[in-house]
Image (cartoon, rainbow, N blue to C red):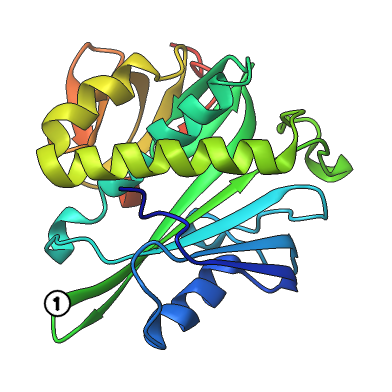
Amino acid sequence: MTWLGAQRIDLESCASTNDEAARFARAGALHGTIVIAERQEAGRGRAGRAWASPAGGLYFSAVMRPPLPLAEVPPLTLAIGIAVCDAARAFGAAAQLKWPNDVLVADKKLAGVLVETQSQSGRLDSVIVGIGVNLEIVPPEVAHRATALHVDRETFIAELIARVEVWTDRYIACGLEMIVPAWQERMAPGLSARATIDGAAIVGELAGIDGDGALLLRDPRGIVHRVRSGDVEVIQAPAGL
């Protein structure tokens, strides 16, 4: 039974669809409620980075109330990334994943994912899954590092909803055991990262992700390090490796 998109709220403009979805969640919005805006005035990505959100793109957030402990919510980002990647591939894009939450085409950013939680007394109340996709237009200020998918907006939304529902259900049912290999199959090659590990700065090549969803970074000596999202910045080039 389809649950994602059972209730849909369309907005012409808002500061952030994630903020709107969070507000609806606090007011009791059902599991699967989605919020879609024509444009965002203050769109954001991971670590509060600005997301250019002109009219023409897709700014989508979903209210989810999965039966998960708080500690198991962050890896949901990986499952959602797979879903967005597969939705883009369904329309012919050679989409790949950049850890932890970006979708690339030809080394340029097509989409991003932002998963946020709301909790009470240490228990999960709701998960807000935000997805931004460049459709038809790329703002000039980011044209050197972003790309767009040229597809009918409603057709893409339908595909995206179907893929997100499937991969969310798989993660809830099977955990990371199913998500990790699927994510690695779609991982963009040739990327490296800068990380701070035990106070030391390290640049290395990406070696995939481990069973807990953490990034594996291989340094110039061949040593593989396990790093979390707060400790690492993925970069495009191998940075002299």
Position of residue 83 in the picture relative to residue 146 (left or right): left
- In front: 64, or 227? 64
Q: Quadrant of the C terminus?
A: top left
Position of residue 51 in the picture relative to residue 21 (left or right): right
Residue drawn where x is 59% and y is 39% of the image: 111
Residue 43 position, x and y percent, is 65, 63
Q: Is residue 152 visible?
A: yes
Residue drawn where x is 41% and y is 54% of the image: 4
81 versus 45 height, above or below:
above
- Locate residue 60: give its quadrant: bottom right
Residue drawn where x is 66% and y is 36% of the image: 155
Q: Secondary structure at mark 1?
A: strand
Q: Is residue 228 visible?
A: no
Position of residue 95 in the picture relative to residue 77 (left or right): right
- In front: 24, or 137? 24
Residue drawn where x is 64% and y is 55% of the image: 59
Kindly identify which residue carries mark 1: 123
- In front: 49, or 139? 139
- Amino acid type at mark 1: Arg
- Locate residue 36: give its quadrant: bottom right
Q: Residues within 10 Å of mark 1 (few under 14, many from 20)?
A: few
Residue 150 position, x and y percent, is 77, 28
- In front: 52, or 205? 52
In this figure, what is the number of numbered marks?
Answer: 1
Residue 142 position, x and y percent, is 78, 40
34 versus 119 height, above or below:
above
Residue 219 position, x and y percent, is 28, 19
- Locate residue 166: give its quadrant: top left
